[in-house]
Amino acid sequence: MDKLAEHLFDHAPDTPYPTEGPTLVAVRLSEFWVRMDDHFGEAYARSVAHDHVLQELGGRTVDQALAAGVPAKQVWRAVCAEFEVPARKR
């Protein structure tokens, strides 16, 4: 995993809007999908994102939450809680 992307994802402020230009949001979203694919596998990650409703995201799917502007870090935390993602993958 790219250490800079991982650091930005883990330590940048939770905001759906870029604070240092549009690349910050792109990095967070890219890192989110890397983590989803790593945990679920690429095909199943897309299925989970599209079909599974998470109450922690206001009764929305991952796709709906991201489209609504929920920060990728917040969505990832909800996925971790729902699917009991091991701490080493968080």
Image: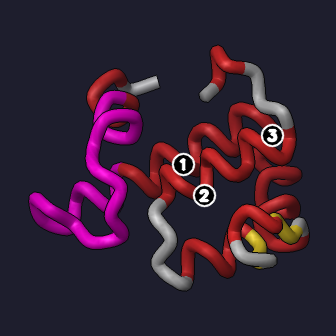
State which quarter of the image contains the C terminus.
top right
Q: CA distance from mark 1 to mark 3?
A: 13 Å
Q: Which residue is mark 1?
A: 32
Residue type indicated by callout 2: Val
Residue 39: image location, x then y, percent:
76, 33
Residue 74, placed above or below residue 80: below
Question: Which contiguous range is marked in magenta?
Answer: 7-27
Residue type, numbered disc 3? Gly
Of marks 1 and 3, the one in the foreground: 1
Does residue 48 lie above or below 80 as drawn?
A: below
- Front of the two marks 1 and 2: 2
Reading the image, the residue beneath label 3 is: 41
**Residue topped by disc 2:** 75
Give whichever of 86, 49 is nearer the camera: 86
**Could you tell me which secondary element the residue under label 3 belongs to?**
loop
Of the two numbered discs 3 and 2 in the rendering, the one whose residue sits closer to the viewer: 2
What residue is drawn where x is 54% and y is 48%?
32
Q: Are marks 1 and 2 in contact (CB under 8 Å)?
A: yes
Answer left or right for 11 relative to 19: right
- Residue type at the position of mark 1: Phe
The answer to whether residue 59 is above or below residue 20 is below
Q: Earlier in the sequence, mark 3 or mark 2?
A: 3
Q: Which mark is residue 59?
A: none
Mark 1 crowdedness (10 Å alpha carbons): few <14, some 14-19, many ≥20: many
